[in-house]
Amino acid sequence: MTDNTLNRNLNRQINKFLSDEIINENPSLQKFIEAVNQSYKNYEKDAELFDQSIRLNDIEFNEINTKIKDQLEKKKNIQVQLIQAIKLLSINNNALELGAEDNLTELLQILHNEIEYKKESEEQLSISKVNAEKANEAKSDFLSIMSHEIRTPLNAIIGLIFIMEKEGTIESFNENFDILKTSAQNLFLLLNNILDFNKIEAGKIDLEEIPFNFKDLLMELVRSLKAKALENQNKIEVIIDENFESHVISDPLRISQIITNLIQNAIKFTKNGLIQVKIDQINAIDNHSVFRVQISDNGIGIDLEKFNSIFEKFSQADTKTSRQFGGSGLGLVIIKNLLNLFHSEIELESEIGRGSKFSFVLNLPIFNENSEMENGKKEVDFKEKKLAGLRVLLVEDNLINVKIAEKILNQWDVVVDVALNGLIAVEKHKNSKYDVILMDLSMPVMDGYEAAIIIRSTDSLIPIIALTASTSYSSLEKAMQIGIDEFITKPFNPKELNLKLGKHYKS
């Protein structure tokens, strides 16, 4: 056995403890040394194989570890993109919960939900778009109808004034006066409907509480509409329950508006027929009169399918109806909304070719000598009354409007002083005593707002009524905030002016 065949570590140990002589003389020892040497060799091979295995495992581990890191990075990127997509899609812009970022399945579910919300939102948007297009179409039709309705009486007024100027005779004046008056009234009612519609939309209508005789009011309205009914060869019949408690407290102007609109509708859609106005007493309890007002006709009637649409703004039962019979399409909308203020609803029965029946129920306090009013006043006659001695400062820059207002106020024996702008009004108020100020809001030099502020700084009690053509409710709201007590919108109803002035009149 040579040293070259022995394991280096084994050869070192043999040389240290055994001589060659002892080894050569002992065959058994030689075999033992060969067995040990073989064990060393086997160990070295196993160690080499183990090292190789370790190296291979390290390489494989590194590859797997790299792949896992890549997958985790991709997952993280996907999560970030999903979160961004969800935030972009989110309808409610709600922040994601932190827990959701660690759960890809949860994120996918959130994304799915957001996509569903988005689809639902798009469907709603599509429906809204269709409705908006229909509304725009309805408004366009409405504006076309309004243009026709306004131009028709204006054409008559302008034409008749031209004819009366040319002819210049009393006969011409008498002949054309009624037509001129009717055309002006139609235009006035139309403009008032538009203004009332705007007031209702803005929630700016307040009901008065005034004692009046409902029966007398109704009979006066019917008398004023009989001439109109005769134009279509119609008759108006009034039937009033003999037990009707007619002395009530409410807003006679708004009630007149409701009943007048309904009777005018019946007249318009009826030819050679009968319009019936009927009042039935339901009961009278707790000092309240509960009764039904019914206006029926035997005119063209309304299709059952159109019942709801006729109470919608800018709508009529049929566009052909507006062309044939006229009208703005606002009357029934206004009636419905006014009745809501009275806590009542309009009811309708109708049949094509057989006529229509509109009705509503009112529950109003009964007025008697012992009734207590909030303002401490007793019976107030709804009819125009004299206001002799009432001192009014009229603040108006338009000379035509000044002349008209003066003539109307003079009919009631009102003492009128005129200021052509707010600055003059402030000086006149400082140097004179007035019971009421009628204030236009838009004037040169100093407008009504500034004048009211200055007057209010020294006088918190004098009533200031805005008599204005402004229909902007932001400006009217501003007027109320600076101390203007109430307002009347031009064109104004003289009875409304008489009523408001009457509140401040002491006989």
Image (tube, rainbow, N blue to C red):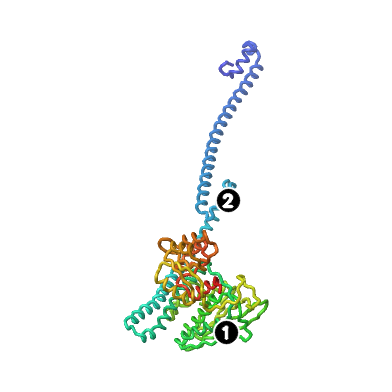
Nearest the viewer among 337 and 260 is 260
Q: Residue at x 53, y 49 (%)?
A: 83
Res 126 visible: no
- Depth check, mark 2 against mark 1: the one in front is 1
Nearest the viewer among 247 and 168 is 168
Residue farthest left in this picture: 166
Nearest the viewer among 184 and 370 is 370
The picture places residue 227, in percent across and down from the top left corner, at 46, 86
Question: Would you name the residue on which mark 2 appears?
Answer: 106
CA gap between label 2 and label 1 equals: 69 Å
Mark 1: which secondary structure? strand
Seen in the picture, residue 248 relative to 132 is either above or below; the reply is below
Residue 419: image quadrant is bottom left
Dividing the image into 4 quarters, which one contains the N terminus? top right
- Mark seen at residue 278: 1
Mark 2 Cα shell of 10 Å, populated few (<14), some (14-19), many (≥20)? few
What amino acid type should be assigned to the residue bearing mark 2? Glu
Seen in the picture, residue 65 relative to 491 is either above or below; the reply is above
Q: Residue at x 42, y 71 (%)?
A: 402
Seen in the picture, residue 120 relative to 403 is either above or below; the reply is above
Residue 287 appears left or right of 392: right
- Mark seen at residue 79: none
Dividing the image into 4 quarters, which one contains the C terminus? bottom right
The picture places residue 108, in percent across and down from the top left corner, at 55, 52
Residue 38 appears left or right of 495: right
Mark 2: which secondary structure? helix
Mark 1 Cα shell of 10 Å, populated few (<14), some (14-19), many (≥20)? some
The picture places residue 503, in percent across and down from the top left corner, at 55, 71
Residue farthest right in this picture: 286
Res 444 visible: yes
Mark with earlier residue (2, 1): 2
The picture places residue 89, in percent across and down from the top left corner, at 51, 54
